[in-house]
Amino acid sequence: MRRRISFGRAALICALFLCVDVILVSIMLPVVSSAISSGVIPSSVIPSGVIPSGVISVGSYECTERYGAPEPYCIKINIPAFTLTLLSGKALVKTYPIAVGKPASPSRIGTCKVVEKATYPTWYPPDGRPPVPPGPDNPISCRWLGLSWSGYGIHGTNNPGSIGKAVTLGCIRMHDRDVIELFDIVPVGTKVEFVYETLEVSSDAWEPMEMRLTVYRDLYQIGTNTVERVLEFLRTYLAQAMPGAKPDMTRDTTTISPLIPDVDRHALAALLSAARGEPEPVPWQVRVELGVMAGSLRSSRGTGHRTDFDVDAIACESTADSDCIEVVDIVCVETGLARIEGNEVLVALRPVAEAFGYRVSWDEEWQAAIVNQHVVGGVVREGRLYVTLDELRHLLDEVAITWDPQTLTLRICTILPATQSYAPESAKKELTAEKGGESRM
């Protein structure tokens, strides 16, 4: 009886150990294979038999036959940006800094593939000089990924200070640590695309004020950094990104659609000339519309009207309700009355306030503007005082102020009672009277 009990206990203990072993292997398997695929753990340190056949972990994201083949790697090299980007399918894996061909021996533009790989290669100078064996004097250093274009490749360097410059004979240099990492990831046959793009747009939101434009130097003087090309670039980007924004294909391709903001061409030209290679705000111009409305603000409601006024335009046109607001006339349009600084819209106080009949003066003692006995701070830019939209709404409490962040349009309208007659010409004279002799504050 004791033997039977002991044998039963032993069998139970063995079964428990077997279960624990199976559970541990099932838990550790994805972790280990993922670590191998990311290069954290070399495959040589993993005991044989831990990873069963069917798990792909070398040169790709960890993937099993059950889930199908992994996305192939591809390499994209942007010459003016000095960047090599590794992609898995459409997913970004990593971006590396590089050196590219100098203007006298430019890197090629087009598509090729990796056809060979070598560690610690011998360099054969193209001018017929003696071969340079592996070592500190070898300019291609520790790794070579030969391309299908004869004589071209991606390699390391014994001159790390050259990275980020156009100094090679056409090949792509990388830091040794980077080329070793890339070498271990991509297999022979990997597609390599060389592009020459000096413009990049990035944005955290779908509003123009959030957009950033990066301009790289036109290394090979191809003529990519022109104002016209940037305008077309921005128009295409916004037409794809902004809801309701459509490029006007009937107009000249160098112009911006009315639904897309205007750009300060002089500021844009300066940005192109500097070509700092860093994300910078797009030099948009704020469109300021000064106009007249009839009705009352208290019953306004948004309807998605193109002007983005809080107005039901259709109802206003078909009803005599005095509580409904109607946009009667946009008297004048200006692009020099407001500016964008960071994420703030600043409005030139004096010309806007005086256009609507507000009295503006300057107090030398306070070094501030006075609007109808209200002291105004603001900021001075190029001899003119600017205030924020919130400050403007507080000061001009008898006008309607709306801001459209998609078209960067600021609409400032005086409100007439619905019963009061409206004469467009007289209103136009009233709103534009100050323009001819306005003073800067």
Image (cartoon, grey):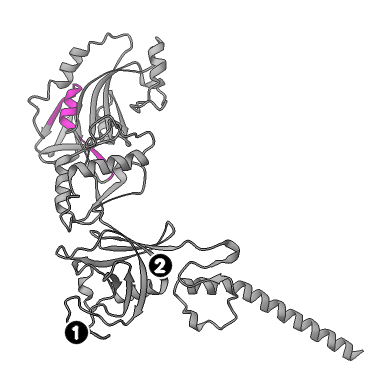
The residue indicated by pointer 1 is 130
In the image, residue 243 sits, relative to residue 29, either above or below, namely above
In the image, residue 417 sits, relative to residue 344, either above or below, namely above
Q: Which of the pair 57/329 is nearer the observer?
A: 57
What stretch of residues is rendered in magenta? 343-361
The quadrant of the rendering that contains the N terminus is: bottom right
Q: What is the secondary structure assignment of the residue under circle 1?
A: loop
Amino acid type of disc 1? Pro
Q: Are marks 1 and 2 in contact (CB under 8 Å)?
A: no
Residue 347 part of the magenta-drawn span: yes
- Callout 2: 10 Å neighbours few (<14), some, many (20+)? some
Point out residue 78 in the picture as x, y percentages from the top left corner.
28, 59
Point out residue 228 in the picture as x, y percentages from the top left corner.
19, 41
The residue indicated by pointer 2 is 189
Q: Which of the pair 14/105 is nearer the observer?
A: 105
Q: Which of the pair 94/383 is nearer the observer?
A: 94
Q: Residue at x 24, y 61 (%)?
A: 108
